[in-house]
Amino acid sequence: MDGSSAPGPVAGDFLTLLKQRRIISDIPHGLTNHSGLTETVATTILGFKFADGVLVAGDRRATAGNVVMYDRADKVLEIDRHSVMAIAGSPATAWEMARILEHSFQFYRRSQLQEMSVEGKVRSLSKLLRDNLGMVMQGLGVVVPLFAIYDKKNPDPAKLFFYDAMGAQFEATDFASSGSGAAAVRSVLYYEQNWGVSPLRERSREDAILLALKALDTAAEADTATGGIDRHGKIFPIIKTVSAAGIATVSDDKLSELFQAHVA
Amino acid sequence: MIDEPYRWVEAISNRREYIENELATGSPTIGLSFSKGILLLTFGRDRRKIFEIYDRIAMGAIGHPGDIERLRMTAIELAGTEGFTRSAADVSLRRMVTYSFSPALKQAFEQIYGAPYLARILFAEVGPSEESDLFVRLDYDGTMHANSMGGGKNRENFGAIAGTRRGLERVESVLSRAKVSNLRSALEAAIRAWGSGFYAAGEDHPDAPEESVVNEFVKSRLEQYSIEAALLERGGTASRVAFVEVPESDLEAALSKFR
């Protein structure tokens, strides 16, 4: 019973609580990766703004060197009712970060009796990435995420952020991508934004989903680490949209239908 | 002083009397389980008294705001760290109250050179069905009462706390007779239970009040007190977080009967 214990440097900070109780430990410094361990990494993710809000998508492949570790990885993670994090890099670290974030936002809301601000949430992820710097310097556990949030109170409610591995946060105006297939995805989105039928922000949900499928398929064409769309195993990317109504996941049936009709 | 057993017993008994006096004016908090989930309701004057603890757990309290705050933070921290290290499914109200809260409250109460917790808490945990909803009343001395402790015991579909024993009996008697089918009827039953309990506790009213007296009493209290209600929704929602505040419009509709 130490609910009375003096609040940490920042009231309502779940991370401080975890560290105080030694539930998560600080990352050891000074180690180098001589173990010959081939790290599992997850690849291509993308996000862009469309008419209703933000769309976030990720392929399903996780690789370790040239081995496909897992072809059904979920890289697009719901953090709370209006925010989504997508991960590229080490799933071991990224899934843990997502869990910490989810618990941090809820812990803050419950203990402080108010919702954390959008800026606060975006900073929280930045802080986790910075805390991970020791690992990054050792060449392991690198995570380069995207973070999408819908802020009802803001006149410009759809927000999309991307980060570098050290925790710098950048707000994307229209689109962002990360992971090994990012360059291809970025080219597709840039082209569509400037010379496509209409700017991304004016596209309907269905058009946005279709574009995400095409962009991931393009990435998979040249990058073996990107799973793309598995026509035989019926493995489709994970696509989520964040809008005023909350988060919606596009069903595999819907993806299959769109894919058959417009992409295949 | 504590060298002498008699003095210790006397000190504890004084302490109990003091705390009971302090709690006596507390406004009851009602927990009522029905098909949609658990409704928690109270009326307060100046501060919030119903709080979200974890995904499926909430609490209401009577007592000193400082003590309530300490207990509330402890509950949030315990549940949060358990949910993080294991999983949300491993967070259990029964475990939390039995193994963490009850012993700590008893110890604080009986250490007569330290300050006891001036608080009485109602915890509620929503389950997959009405039969699995759990209410636990936890007192300043660590004693607890649950609506069911498993086994064959008759279950109650409610839990409540009140300032006095008689107040609690009144609340429970109303709730045990209530027929609840939806949020509206749950709100009305809870408001009536609150009125009966607070009426019995506040003044010298040994007998159960007539319904019209309760209605009149609630009406008169509405000038100083405002209603506060939350729902722990059962399943169904996209998120696993069950706690939602009851919309203002629903509260007004339920109160219109008493205005």
Image (tube, rainbow, N blue to C red):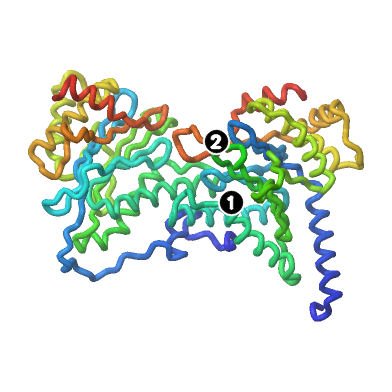
Chain letter belonging to callout 2:
B
Query: Toward the viewer: A218 or B124?
Result: B124
Could you say which disc has been placed on residue B168 in the image?
Answer: none
Note whether B6 is above or below B256 in the view shown: below
Q: In which quadrant will I find the C terminus of chain A?
A: top left
Tell me: A45 left or right of B93: left
Chain letter belonging to callout 1:
B
Percent of width and height locating residue B127: 56, 41
Kind of residue sitting beneath label 1: Leu
Question: Disc 1 designates what residue?
Answer: B93
Kind of residue sitting beneath label 2: Arg
Number of labelled discs? Answer: 2
Tell me: A3 left or right of A225: right
Residue ID at (31%, 23%): A51
Percent of width and height locating residue B38: 62, 37
Cα–Cα gap, marks 1 and 2: 16 Å
Which residue is situated farthest in the front direction here?
B152
Could you say which disc has been placed on residue B234 in the image?
Answer: 2
Percent of width and height locating residue B210: 88, 29
Asked if labels 1 and 2 share a chain, the reply is yes
